[in-house]
Image (cartoon, rainbow, N blue to C red):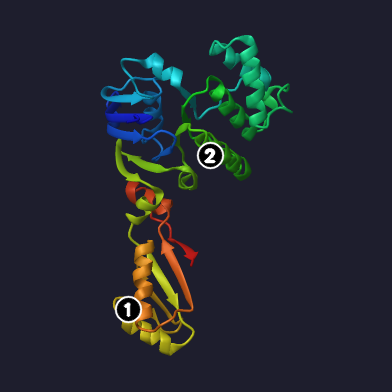
């Protein structure tokens, strides 16, 4: 049986009187994207620092790439790559020199270091800028170089701590493509992000960290279904059909002027099929059906209790 890429049990960490992590359990399967969400100060970066051996937990156990953090930190470091919130790129030297420096740090032979550098610069579309000082790079280029440097040692597990913060939408989508390509190659990605859309787009599983604890975990769809407010809106062109549907769908909220009905529904395939079966049984056909489902913003706000949830988004079906 293959071991998980990352497994943690009861991780705790305090700084003085401030408890940052208060018994965190995590399991990340190999070759997946795991996103850790939470408000500022929730402990996301601390979790990354512990799992990447940069700081020690006060208590708890964890293994990364099958190696125990406390007993085999060097083996863990050899298996991982880390891209932090702040760029590790040296702006005073060229992109190529940054890459070669990283190859030296990994003790790669000179020829191997140059081969890996050339391959990664090409993969991240940085060949044209390779001889230019990194200080002249755009934010997106620096982020791409950052991840390219992380990949020099061919890690199978990568920690990305808010990798797209400050990037424009186009650069952010480019980073998403890079992350998807890494996972397609079998790399495991542990991602922290302040962009909920990013977690929704990329993550196989998402955990929400609040008050030092994991308050929810699951796929994006599973988390969305935990939040009330999902419903289906039916629109009819005639008052007779609207009246018949209202009689058939007890509990629905009607708008006689707009000829619409609203009925609680989580938007799942099973729930939608059951609703449509009820309409078919009554011989009623709606002219328009719209599913309103909570999004990750709603989930985040509800679970961290930091603000009022946004209105559910609509998806026409």
Query: On the picture, is 50 further left or further right than 17?
Result: right
Q: Quadrant of residue 112?
A: top right
In the displayed structure, 54 sits above or below 126; it is above
x and y, in percent, of residue 119 in the image: 65, 25
Q: Quadrant of residue 268?
A: bottom left
Q: In which quarter of the image is residue 308?
A: bottom left
x and y, in percent, of residue 314 in the image: 47, 64
Q: How many marks?
A: 2
Query: On the picture, is 293 further left or further right than 134?
Result: left
Name the element at disc 2. helix
Residue that mark 1 sits on: 249
N-term mark: 1 or 2: 2
Q: Which residue lies furthest to the bottom in this view?
A: 240
User: Which one is closest to the eye, mark 1 or mark 2?
Assistant: 2
Asked whether residue 88 is in view, the answer is no
Residue that mark 2 sits on: 180
Q: Nearer the viewer, residue 60 or 92?
A: 60
In the displayed structure, 148 sits above or below 162; it is above
Name the image quarter holding the N terminus: top left
| Classed neighbour count for the residue bearing mark 1: other residues with Cα under 10 Å, few (<14), some (14–19), many (≥20) | some
x and y, in percent, of residue 62 in the image: 31, 25
Q: Nearer the viewer, residue 87 or 308?
A: 87
In the displayed structure, 84 sits above or below 214; it is above
Q: Which mark is residue 70?
A: none
């Amino acid at each position: 049986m293959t071991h998980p890429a990352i497994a943690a049990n009861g991780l705790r960490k305090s700084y003085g009187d401030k408890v940052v992590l208060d018994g965190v359990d995590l399991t990340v399967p190999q070759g997946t994207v795991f996103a850790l969400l939470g408000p500022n100060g929730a402990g996301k970066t601390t979790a990354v620092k512990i799992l990447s051996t940069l700081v020690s937990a006060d208590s708890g156990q964890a293994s990364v790439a099958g190696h125990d953090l406390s007993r085999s930190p060097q083996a863990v470091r050899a298996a991982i790559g880390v891209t932090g919130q702040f760029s590790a790129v040296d702006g005073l030297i060229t992109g190529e020199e940054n890459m070669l420096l990283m190859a030296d740090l990994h003790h790669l032979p000179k020829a191997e270091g140059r081969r890996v550098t050339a391959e990664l610069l090409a993969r991240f579309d940085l060949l044209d800028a390779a001889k230019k000082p990194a200080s002249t790079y755009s934010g997106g280029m620096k982020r791409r170089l950052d991840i390219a440097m992380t990949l020099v040692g061919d890690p199978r597990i990568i920690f990305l701590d808010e990798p797209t913060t400050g990037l424009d939408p186009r650069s952010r989508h480019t980073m998403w493509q890079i992350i998807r390509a890494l996972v397609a190659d079998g790399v495991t990605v542990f991602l922290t992000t302040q962009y909920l859309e990013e977690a929704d787009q990329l993550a196989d599983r998402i955990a929400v960290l609040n008050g030092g604890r994991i308050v929810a975990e699951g796929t994006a769809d599973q988390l969305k279904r935990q939040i009330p407010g999902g419903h289906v809106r039916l629109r009819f062109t005639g008052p007779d059909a609207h009246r018949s549907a209202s009689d058939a769908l007890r509990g629905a909220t009607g708008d006689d002027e707009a000829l619409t009905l609203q009925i609680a529904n989580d938007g799942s395939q099973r729930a939608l099929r059951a609703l449509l079966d009820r309409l078919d049984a009554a011989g009623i056909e709606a002219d328009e059906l719209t599913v309103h489902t909570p999004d990750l913003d709603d989930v985040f706000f509800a679970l961290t209790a930091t603000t009022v949830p946004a209105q559910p988004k609509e998806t026409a079906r």
